[in-house]
Each structure stands twice: as C-alpha cells, then as structure tokens.
Amino acid sequence: MPSLETINLCGTIVIFLLLALSLKNVFFGLLAYFLAMASRIGLHYPALGKVRIELTIALIVLIATFISRKNIGEKCALTYNPVNKYMFCFFCVIMASFVQTWDYAESWEFFVIEFIKVYVFFVMIVILLESEQDIRLFLWVFALVTIWLNYEGLFRYFSEQHSYQFQGVDVAISSKGFAAGHVAAANMQLQCLPVMIYLAFYEKKLIFKIFACILSVLSVLGVIASGSRGGFLGLIVIGILFVYFSKKRTLALLVCSSIFIVSLSFLPGNYMGWMGSIVGYADDSATSRITGLINGIEMMIRRPILGVGPGCYRLARKAWFGWGLESHNHYGQVMGDLGLAGTIAWGFFIVYVFKNLSQAKKVFQEKGHNIVFLIIGIQVALIVRLFEGMFSHSLYIFFWYVMAALSIALLKVSEKEDQYETA
C-alpha cells in the first residue's frame, strides 16, 4: 500500500487542482473545500495550517460563487425549502445558547467556529449543486475523502502495525482528524458505507461499479479495524436496511448472510469474542452511553431553554455529576448542550431532511430513474447514524448538514425532472 505521506500529498495536490478548476466552474471549488475541511489538511501540513488554508479556500469559493451565480438570494431564502428554515433556526439556537454558555472559550474555539464552517458549507452545497451529475460527483468525493480520513487506520491494519490493543482486540485507527479514536473511525466509515454500496448500483459502467465495491470493502475493513462494538452493530443495521430496501428481499438476505459467514473466516481470532460481549455486557463503556443520555436530560431540566451551551456538556457534567466525560450519546448531547429549543429545532430539521428524500424518491421511482439508489444510500446512512447516536456524540460534525443540503439538491432536481416531463 502507498504510504500515508504519499496519500496526503496526492490529496493535497488534488485540492489545489480542484481549486484551479474552480476558475472555470466554481463547483470544483466546493469539492476542494470539502476535501480540505474534511481531511483537516492543516494538521498534516502545519505550514498550510498557519495560513488558514481552509478559511482561504472557503473565501475564494464564496467570492467566486457570488460572482458567478445569479440565484443566490432565492436558494438562501428560508422559504426555498423547509430544511433551510430549520437549519437557520438551529443555528440561531446555537448562537443564543452561546450567549449564556458555561464556558465562552470552550464553546467558541471548539464548537461554534466549527459549526459556522459547517453552516457555510451547507449554504455552498445548496447554491452550487444543480444537477444529477453534480450530486453524483459530490458523493464520489464524499466516498474518497472517507477512505482518506481512515487511510492511516487501513494502512496499519494491512501492515499489522496496530495503534494499540483494547480488550484483547488489535485496533488500527488514524492518529489525527475526524477518524482519530476507535468510535470516530467506525462512525466515519459507517456514515459513508451505504453511499458507497448504492453508488455501485447506481453507476452504469462496470469500472465504476467495481471501484465502488472496492471502497465499500475498505470501509467495512475500517470498521473492523477500529474494534468498535457500536461499529459492528452499525454494519448489522446496514445489512438489515439493505434487505429492507431491496425489491428482492430473499435474495438480498441470502447475499448479506453469505457475506457475513464468509467474512468470519477473515476476522482476528479474538474479534468475535469481543463483539459477542455486546449481549449482556454492563461495563463502563456501555453504561456511560446510557448515563450520557440521562445526564443530558438532567442538564436540560436544570437549564431547560438553551442548555449549558455549545460543547459544554463535558464541563457541566464534571461540575454537576463529578464525571468530566463527553456524552457519548447524540441525544444526550443535544438536550444537554442546547436544551429544549435545540432539541426541537434539530428534531424538525432531521424530519424535513427525510421528507425531502422521500418526496424526491417518489418522483424518481415513478419515472424508473436509477438516481433512486443514491437517495436510498443517503437514507440508510442517516438511519445508521441515528442508530449510532446512542453510542456517540455527533451534533456538530459535517455529516448531518451535508446530507441535509443534498436532500434539498435532490428534491430540486426531481422537481425539474417532473416539470420537464410535464412540459
């Protein structure tokens, strides 16, 4: 396998090539920013970090967007799509919660700034994704950046240079970025794996189908290498949803069962023993997830409207409950950080994301369009991430808001398709 340094260098070159191509089409600048933001390229190259490369690319893309696109006001309007409205409401709740946050420095530096970047990226996607091919290319970049994020873990896995051993299981993960940590590594792979799988069904050319399958296998191996029990459950959930969304469910069940049985022979000898501890276990790792939810509810009771502030769950938990640990529970994090207002806003937000996808899928299904596979991939990814929310906190990561923007793009493409057919 190529070294991590080689992959990072190639990724950085691609970022700058895409940025150069943005002079012709600003959409490529969006892809450049996606790669730079998700890979945290400044962590790999400190010199780029010093010049704030992510911010620089974002400013270039925003300026180019305002110059080249004429319908920005329409697409940014809260009436353009309900997800726009609830995304804005959620952002307002975060900013209002920040005013009364537990710790201003903690909130601003590690959470508010990060979410502002995510919000800007959301707006970029809504403005710039205008066609099926835009969505297709964006999802391919999402798949590739996911493998890049966990490449160090995969490299360690194949070269048997494991990061550490946990409960008798050799763990191989990245040391930097979004995939650092065994739970984060598993979640990064799980949130894109359905997209990779359904890209294989969507693509018409065999070479793209094969490439999507290769990425899917690497993603599964990334989950296994992480040693995460929640990640293992996530793979099972993906299998169940794959069967559910299949037209030929019996065949899909047979395929998934066969893959699972065959894969058992390739797993480390102690892996299934550790995964088997999911049933009936009550260790600190398990109870902390449930306690994270309970503590989040208790925080909302103490600060009902706006919570303890963005990213301050850990600090409030230490002060009130004597345990300075993050929630490790998405729902506990929402309630604890942002209170009732944040919980309601985020709830409406995610509901309308699914509504967008369902409406778009209905239109394309009626026309027999294979873009339905991409919509199903996003739906499965969201469901799996919601399931994983019981085992990890993920409120401020880019995934939810990228999928939300894609749901708007897919709905608008379906409306154009419907209008074209009617005309």
Image: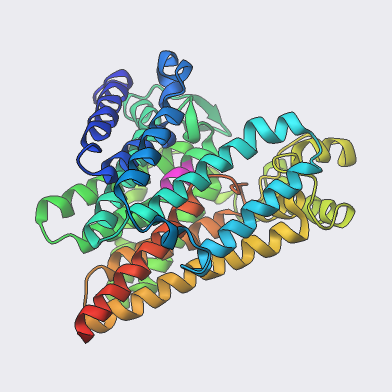
The boundaries of the magenta stretch are 186-190
Image quadrant for the N terminus?
top left
* Most foreground residue, 63 or 241: 63
**Residue 96: percent from left, percent from top:** 74, 49
| Residue depicted at x 57% and y 43% | 115
Q: Position of residue 295 (x, y in %)?
A: 80, 50
* Colour treatment of the image: rainbow
Q: Judge whether residue 261 can be spotted in this image.
A: no
Considering every residue shown, the one lying at the far bottom of the view is 422
Residue at 22% from the left image edge and 86% from the top image edge: 422
Q: Is residue 47 above or below residue 372?
A: above
Give me the residue at 42% from left, 28% from top: 56
Is 390 drawn above or below residue 161 in the view shown?
below
Up the image or down, 33 lies above or below 139; here it is above
Residue 354 magenta-highlighted:
no
- Between residues 291 and 373, which one lies in front from this camera angle? 373
The residue at the point 52 percent across, 47 percent down is 119
Q: Quadrant of the C terminus?
A: bottom left
Residue 325, position as x, y percentages in the image = 74, 36
Relative to residue 217, is residue 53 drawn left or right? right
Q: Does the image show residue 178?
A: yes
* Magenta stretch: dominant secondary structure: helix
- Judged left or right of residue 9, residue 211 is left
The answer to which quarter of the image holds residue 366 is: bottom left
In this rendering, the answer to whether 297 lies above or below 267 is below
Pick whichever, 384 or 304, lies toward us.
304
Report the side of 83 relative to 309 (left or right). left
- Residue 51, x across and y down, in percent: 44, 18
Q: Is residue 185 left or right of residue 294?
A: left
